Image: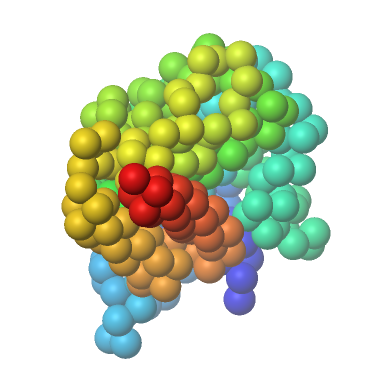
Amino acid sequence: MSIWGKVIGGAAGFAMGGPLGGLLGALAGHAVDEFRGAEQTPRGSDDQGRPDQTQTIAFTVGVIVLSAKMAKADGVVHRVEIEAFKRIFHVPDHELRNVGRLFDAAKRDSAGFETYAKQLAQMFQDRPEVLEELLAGLFHIAVADDIVHLAELAFLRRVAEIFGFPPDEFEQVWRQHGTRIEGANAPEDDPHAILGVPKDADFDTIKAAYRKLMRENHPDALIAKGMPQEFIDLAHEKTAALNAAYEKLERDMRGK
């Protein structure tokens, strides 16, 4: 079953707990009771090394809920943002109603976005690459209409802070996923910053940083850590940015 088909389910909410589970449970209603006796996969991975469904559902719900909260930041949900969400995250037509219900419930929910961001930060505290991809998903929603409002930018910075990313790492994510931003003084497209190396780094240092980032952000590695298959375009975009930055620096080094 697609991850979207499992999002609105009592078992997921009951197993997840916290504000994310509470929102799912309230939305599912009586479904929580139906699944109370269901066998739950322990937190982490199953006996075949695959991430448990609680983790992958948490990632998915986190993107939906935080996207809804970000939409409230500038007060307007644009159709292009919804279309970008559907396209990038591969939401099938028959699951749009469930995703829409969760989005609307999160938008109406009185709890602040920080409550949800903190739960996600705790769930994925040992997997910063997954949190980075979740932040990248929010960037995609923010830039869908080709402009980021200052309130949205402040929202993204605060989420990054809760996730444990210092300012320089936030700028790195911005460069990797948000270079199309207009109206918010987007940082320059700096290949050194994209790879997280100083401007005076030698080629061996650049190569080592590139290989480390490629290993950490390989789609298969991210899926094993809890990122749903449906979100894999995010990982492909990240690796494409890393490849482009490395190739540019390699050309520059050879030209010296």
Residue 88 horizontal side relative to residue 113, left or right = right
**Which residue is drawn at the image coordinates 19% and 52% (left, top)?**
205
61 left or right, relative to 183:
left
Residue located 70% across and 19% down the image: 76
Q: Residue 238, position in %: x, y?
A: 47, 52
Number of marks in picture? 0
Provide residue 23's location: percent of width, then percent of height. 49, 42
| Image height of 30 relative to 184, above or below | below
| Residue in the picture at 36% in, 69% down | 221
Relative height, residue 164 to residue 44 (above, below): above
Q: Quadrant of residue 161?
A: top left
**Which of 97 and 22 lies nearest the eye of the viewer?**
97
Residue 200 in sight here: yes
Is the image coloured rainbow, by chain, by secondary structure, or in one colour? rainbow
Q: Quadrant of residue 154?
A: top left
| Picture quarter with the C terminus | top left
Residue at 35% from the left image edge and 78% from the top image edge: 50
Tell me if I can see residue 62 in this picture.
no
**As drawn, is 6 to the left or to the right of 126?**
right
Q: Could you tell me which quadrant the N terminus lies in?
A: bottom right
Between residues 142 and 43, which one lies in front from this camera angle?
Answer: 142
- Furthest residue to the front? 256
The quarter of the picture where residue 39 lies is bottom left
Q: Position of residue 88 (x, y in %)?
A: 65, 52
Q: Position of residue 227 (x, y in %)?
A: 43, 61
| Relative height, residue 137 to residue 146 (above, below) | below
